[in-house]
Amino acid sequence: METIKTKIENETQYNWAMARIDELLPKVNEETPDDDPNSIELYLISALVQEYEDVHYPIGTPSLIDILKLRMYELGLSQAALAKKIGVSPSRICDFLSGKSEPTIKVGRRISKELNIDPAIVLGV
């Protein structure tokens, strides 16, 4: 008797599951009943894929450097403009972005407020 697998064990299985999800997505929407076979299959395969991705493709917590660069891009800010916005010198921004130094609590508060960044990310917790 063959044992039924309850998880994705390798990239080949993962790639098959991703392709199957792509096939099922057009067949299922918000109005599809929960007992529809395509809906059930999509739910089950998605759960297996999520479990596999959590182990093999984890998404880490973004660093302050990553978030600062993202916000600068989103807001169209240069290092000089960011420095002016949060009240520090452009060289301090360079130090923050290179990881040479971290902002003080006072500057961290301004970064959080002015750039709408979660304080936990600014504090590194």
Image (tube, helix red, strand yellow):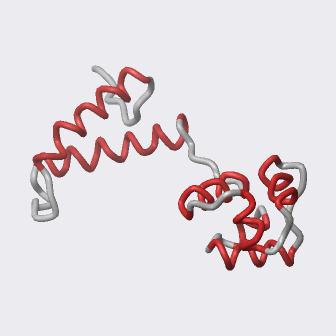
In this orientation, which residue lies closer to the viewer: 42 or 2?
42
Can you give x and y, in whole percent of width and height, for residue 97 in the image?
A: 77, 51
Can you give x and y, in whole percent of width and height, for residue 34 in the image?
A: 15, 60
Q: Is residue 30 above or below residue 94?
A: below
In this orientation, which residue lies closer to the viewer: 18 or 94?
94
Residue 59 located left or right of residue 8: right
Picture residue at 87% right of the left edge, 56% below the top? 91
Residue 96 located left or right of residue 112: right
- Which quarter of the image is occupied by the C terminus? bottom right
Picture residue at 19% right of the left edge, 50% below the top? 40
Which of the 4 image quadrants contains residue 64? Answer: bottom right
- Which quarter of the image is occupied by the N terminus? top left
In this orientation, which residue lies closer to the viewer: 112 or 81?
81
Can you give x and y, in whole percent of width and height, for residue 69 in the image?
A: 65, 54
In this orientation, which residue lies closer to the viewer: 9 or 31?
31
Residue 114 located left or right of residue 38: right
**Number of numbered discs visible in the structure rendering:** 0
Picture residue at 35% right of the left edge, 25% below the top? 13
Which of the 4 image quadrants contains residue 4? Answer: top left
Q: Is residue 123 above or below residue 110?
A: above
Can you give x and y, in whole percent of width and height, for residue 62 in the image?
A: 65, 54
Q: Is residue 115 above or below residue 71?
A: below
Picture residue at 22% right of the left edge, 38% below the top? 22
Residue 94 located left or right of residue 45: right
